[in-house]
Image: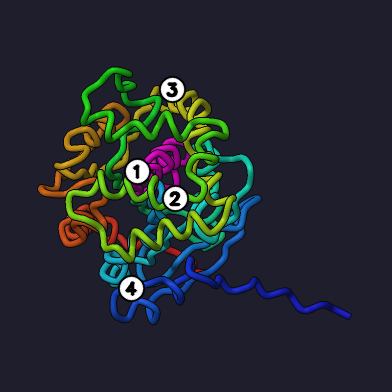
Amino acid sequence: MNEKPRRRPAPEGPGSVLAAPDLPAGFTAMFTSRYVDAGDVRLHAVVGGDGPPLLLLAGWPQTWYAWRLLMPALAEDFRVVAVDPRGVGLSDKPRDGYDTATLADDMAELMTALGHERFAMVGHDVGMWTAYALAADHPDRVVRLAVAEAAIPGVSPSPPLFGSREGNTRLWHFAFNRLAELNEELVRGREHLYFGAQFATKAARPLPESAVRYYIDTLASDPDALRASFDFYRALDETIAQNALRKTTRLTLPVLAIAGAANSGELVATTMRLAAEHVDSLIIPDCGHYPAEEAPEEMLAALSDFLAPYRDDRPTQIVN
């Protein structure tokens, strides 16, 4: 007797679309949460819209939810896939695989599983690290690349240990996050202090309190989530070595570098020009580290213009 195929469980809880707070009107009718097997990990992706595929990857310490204000408008022209990478949100949280080569492979596997061989991508913060690795390691997959608010370890020059007070305020978490265990012991039970300070000091236009609380509660609710949030930084030795090889072959696809004037400024475009041939730059006034939430209208306009040639080309896709 043949067994019926098992249905994947539907994503549930606060990390899913149906339980996320303060979503734009009509969001839950347009987007659904789903689990996708991507190689050896199960990833949580929020999917909706119609058109050529567009992959959105947020940064530390956020989830797919960081894109919520852009997603409805983007879904009018694109098949939007906003994903929690391994270690984040409702995705699996294994003990290893947080170097950008593995993270990029995860994204390639995800998009293959969803039926998208070629796609555009937007990556923010740590998501920018992975986006660069994906474009470099899988150049046949990524058509256009937009990145926001990060330097790339192993590509960008390393900042000085005794830098400015402003630089230290923005970057001190790099060294702290790379610690083996002490950081978890210090932060556990005080997540609102540590992560709350990150959001407060890096945003020029404060994020809604409900959004900050949502991100922090996600990290505080699961010891593996807190551990994995540091694992992206603990894997930096591997990532830096990988990027030393990647940057020997420059990217040739179109790249858009987005930054907040009150945070990274020229740094994002300067970084990408070390690694890519064709880089356009947008610096958003009165914006800090979180442009998709601080300045969604400005970021949406820039992405719409940048992605227009890709949108109009309408590559063939198979939607699973």
Tell me if label 1 and label 4 are in contact, CB under 8 Å. Answer: no
| Residue pictured at 54% horizontal, 48% vertical | 106
Distance Cα–Cα, label 4 vs label 2: 24 Å
Furthest residue toward left: 285
Q: Is residue 103 above or below residue 23?
A: above
> What distance separates the C-alpha of mark 2 from that of mark 1?
20 Å
Secondary structure of the residue carrying tag 4 is loop
Q: Amino acid at mark 4?
A: Leu
Q: Give the x, y percent position of residue 154.
A: 40, 25
Q: Label 3 neighbourhood size at 10 Å, few (<14), some (14-19), many (20+)?
A: few
Q: Which residue is mark 1?
A: 125
Local crowd size for mark 2, using a 10 Å CA cut-off: few (<14), some (14–19), many (≥20): some
Mark with earlier residue (3, 2): 2
Q: Residue at x 28, y 61 (%)?
A: 311
**Camera sees residue 315:** no
Is 319 positioned to the left or the right of 255 in the image? right
Q: Foreground: 22 or 157?
A: 22
Check disc 1: other Cα within 10 Å, few if <14, some if 14-19, many if 20+: many
Q: Where residue 190 sits: x, y (%)?
A: 45, 49
The residue identified by callout 2 is 191
Mark 3 touches mark 4? (CB < 8 Å): no
Q: Nearer the viewer, mark 3 or mark 1?
A: 1
Q: Which residues are magenta?
A: 123-144
Magenta stretch: residue 142 in it? yes
For marks 3 and 2, give the one nearer the viewer. 2
Q: Which mark's residue is nearer the viewer, 4 or 2?
A: 2
Position of 103 relative to 178 (above/below)? below
